[in-house]
Amino acid sequence: MSPCRRIAAFAGAILDPSALTFVVRAVVVVGLISGAAAAAGNAAAGRQKALICQACHDLDGKSKIPEAPNLAGQSEPYLVKALKDYRSGARNNDMMSLVVPGLTDKDIEDLAAYFSAIEVSVTPASK
């Protein structure tokens, strides 16, 4: 028996039909979302495009000026939405209004993939 069939049999044995339906739907939705996010942007292409971001956000996505947020490690869907909102005017910022009008959806997806892939580590302050 395949692992998927074993899991389904186990879930069917411990859950009532309505709960099982909910679990199956949730698994399908999570799979669709994670599959779409994984296929969305190209981090390597995003690194090249990030040169336009480095004046405020630095190439590593860790802002060097107080007015610009850190982009490193932010979630990819959040960055895509934020950039599209700046581009559409739903979100306003003088600096961003100079940069985002020329970005395509693909540029936005690539930039989001790049900045979200940057690992951020935090070390506790010494006492």
Image (cartoon, grey):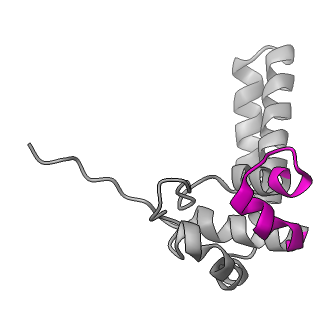
Q: Position of residue 47 (x, y in %)?
A: 64, 81
Residue 100 included in the magenta stretch of the image? yes
Residue 28 included in the magenta stretch of the image? no
Judge by depth and name the residue closer to the eye, 5 or 70. Answer: 70
Is 19 above or below relative to 34? above
Residue 99, quarter of the rendered image = bottom right
* Magenta span: chief secondary structure: helix
Can the viewer see residue 104 in this picture? yes
Judge by depth and name the residue closer to the eye, 12 or 127. Answer: 127
Judge by depth and name the residue closer to the eye, 108 or 4. Answer: 108
Looking at the image, the residue that sits furthest to the left is 127
Q: Position of residue 116 (x, y in %)?
A: 61, 62
Residue 71, quarter of the rendered image = bottom right
Task: Give left or right: position of 72 versus 85.
Answer: left
Residue at 12%, 48% in the rendered image: 126
Task: Give left or right: position of 127 versus 104.
Answer: left
Is 16 above or below relative to 49? above
Residue at 37%, 58% in the rendered image: 121
Residue at 49%, 63% in the rendered image: 63
Looking at the image, the residue that sits furthest to the front is 94
Quadrant of image for the C terminus: top left
Task: Give the tally of numbered discs.
Answer: 0
Can the viewer see residue 39 in this picture? no
The magenta stretch is 85-104
Is 86 above or below relative to 108? above
Residue at 71%, 55% in the rendered image: 79
Q: Position of residue 104 (x, y in %)?
A: 89, 71
Residue 86, quarter of the rendered image = bottom right
Q: Position of residue 80 (x, y in %)?
A: 77, 56
